[in-house]
Amino acid sequence: MTVIIRNASVLNQEGELETRHIVVKDGVISAIESNLDALDESTEIIEAEGKLLIPGLIDMHVHLREPGFEHKETVETGARSAAKGGFTTIACMPNTRPVTDSPEIVQFVKDKAREAGLVKVLPYAAITKNELGRELTDFAALKEAGAIGFTDDGVGVQTAQMMKDAMKLAAGLDMPVIAHCEDDSLVEGCAVNEGKFATAHGLKGIPNESEAIHVGRDILLAEATGVHYHVCHVSTEQSVRLIRQAKQIGILVTAEVCPHHLLLSEEDIPGMDANWKMNPPLRSRRDVEACIEGLLDGTLDIIVTDHAPHSEEEKAKGMQLAPFGIVGFETAFPLLYTAFVATGKWDLSLLVQRMTADPARVFRLNTGHLTVGAPADLTLIDLKEEQEVDPASFASKGRNTPFAGWKLKGWPVMTWVDGTAVWTKAN
Ligand SMILES: NC(=O)N[C@@H](CC(=O)O)C(=O)O
Ligand SMILES: [Zn+2]
Ligand SMILES: [Zn+2]
């Protein structure tokens, strides 16, 4: 079966847009043409009408909540939300119930993803059993089952010895360690950043050091063990500085940043509304600027959503008691496009690279490129039509977003995985 996506606007090597016809055959990009010859009858034509065609977006940090928290999200609803957001590959965190700390649960997630038949779902496995920080999981068996890396996301690994042991083991298996950086002793009972909002509301705040202390510690451990160390959801100026220095001296560290940490600061929080509560919290303007600078100079390699759906009942508990986390799939690209590309601050190619080719490079994935021979994981985007963020319309079960009502451009209209359309915008 041959499909031709006709008159697509694609980015060339120089980052300029040009019109091309993309030929997809057996799930693979088989040609990228500037002229179309006579077509045979079996060819399906999709008219792109000059819309932007990019490699399918990749999100290396997401929470799908299954098994155990199906009221928040399932692999299927999460995968559908991802496809709607233009993502074709997502990597899911192991803080499920049970925790993904055994080959059986890795297999369970893979089975659910196959049944859903939407996007590519890559499972992470836990570093420690039940993410309790006490005992390492069976790394070799988890790798064998299909885990793509090890992380206790949701909590930090509290002791240096445990982290060092994990890194040694992972390095021996040529697997990355992905770290949620948080020192528990500095954050007890905290819901928001230590700063303006906390002071104004008489709250105890989460200090920047609670993140950066782990980043610094782990960089030294990565240097000692030679592991590929990847830092989750960087939110502070200090973490950016430490990662930049570590890269300069050749330590194998990579890092990610979330749209909300590039777009929002604690000063934007309108009140005690838990849709603005996530971990790490919204920091100061200065931290936001440092994260943007880090993303631009490549200190922060990739953009991830940290899609973290919670139910409305849970989020209604208020700022202090509600769980941390916001959804991300269906707003990520339009948010960043509207704030940074449409305003002329960033090149479109930089945004696309940080969400496609860069995650593919960091995690050695066979996707993320619009080139002949690559899997036809593709996303078509309408850069013109403006639309409001409407949580009620989300494919995700989660409605927990601080971006409701924002007027954005850059909405995905069609998503393909291995040449099969997995999501098409209704007209
Ligand atoms: N980011 C969040 O605020 N929450 C995540 C956990 C995490 O990513 O650490 C969740 O699982 O809900
Ligand atoms: Zn985390
Ligand atoms: Zn997370």
Image (cartoon, grey):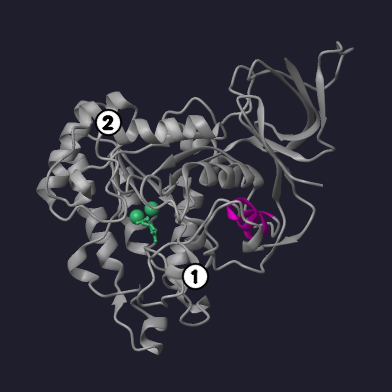
* Residue 298 at x, y percent in the picture: 46, 46
User: Which of the 4 quarters of the picture holds residue 252?
Assistant: top left
What residue appears at the point 42 percent right and 68 percent down from the top-left corner? 314
Q: Indicate whether residue 337 is drawn in magenta.
A: yes
Q: Residues within 10 Å of mark 2 (few under 14, many from 20)?
A: many
Query: Circle 1 is placed at which residue position?
Result: 275
Q: Nearer the viewer, residue 342 or 413?
A: 413
Q: Is residue 300 visible?
A: no
* Residue 132 at x, y percent in the picture: 18, 52
* Residue 91 appears left or right of 95: right
- Looking at the rendered structure, the kind of residue marked 1 is Asn
Tell me which secondary structure the magenta stretch mostly adopts.
helix
Query: Circle 2 is placed at which residue position?
Result: 103
Quadrant containing the N terminus is top right
Q: What stretch is highlighted in magenta?
A: 331-341
Q: Which residue lies furthest to the left in this view?
A: 161
What residue appears at the point 59 percent right and 21 percent down from the top-left corner? 374
